Amino acid sequence: MTEETKQHNFELFIKKLSQLGINTDTLVSSIGDKLKNATFNISTDSGLCGDGTLIETILKTLTPFAVRLNGLYPEDVRVDQNTLVKICLLHQIAKSIRIKPSTEEWKIKKGQLYDYDSEQPSIRTGLHSLVLAQSFGIPFTAEEAEAMVINDRELTDDQARWHSSLLASIVRMANEMTYLQSMNTKKINS
């Protein structure tokens, strides 16, 4: 991905947050460059690995999936689109500081181009993203917080599986669809 593409994606990401009424000054000054260059996944197996793929994937795949899924529900039960977009944009921002380029040649040869940073807290990405966003002054309702951490929950967690809000369910489904699309695209192109 070119530097121009990464910069364009980052500017669009920040613009969308600003349009939602979110002050992005602290986010940009604290993690802006890291966020612009962050990877969505650590391994090339996923097809979502590489500098700049976090924002690219969130903007061009995950969020559109979430918006389309929301549109499938009857209008009277749909999630507020601005809330949905807010969560889609923010629920994985911790990857920008949790994941760093791998330095171990054997991992790189196997396709694991990135590693988790052992100096970061040992918490899941959603929870870390929620804490990080709150530290930048971004407020969340309880329902939004649930959606921010839904991917942290195990698929065997019956409470999360059957009793989550529609917002959280859509965010989880959009993530699953993002990975499935990438894996299927990778198979087709192989």
Image (cartoon, helix red, strand yellow):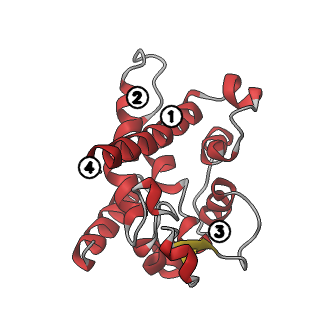
Disc marking residue 44: none
**Residue labelled with disc 3:** 135
- Amino acid type at circle 1 is Met
> Which quarter of the figure is the N terminus placed in?
bottom left
Q: Is residue 18 above or below residue 101?
A: above
Q: CA distance from mark 3 to mark 2?
A: 30 Å
* Contact flag, marks 2 and 1 (Cβ < 8 Å): yes
- Nearest-to-viewer mark from 2 and 1: 1
Asked which quadrant contains residue 117, the reply is bottom right
Viewer-nearest of labels 3 and 2? 2
Foreground: disc 2 or disc 4: 4
Q: Which residue is mark 2?
A: 69
* Labels 4 and 3: the sequence-earlier one: 3
Amino acid type assigned to the residue bearing label 4 in the image:
Asn
Q: CA distance from mark 2 to mark 1?
A: 8 Å
Residue at position x 42%, y 37% from top? 66
Residue on which disc 1 sits? 173
Upstream in the sequence, badge 4 or badge 1?
Answer: 1
Q: Nearer the viewer, residue 91 or 1?
A: 1
Q: CA distance from mark 2 to mark 4?
A: 26 Å
How far across and down, in percent of the image, does residue 128 sit?
67, 62
Q: CA distance from mark 4 to mark 3?
A: 41 Å
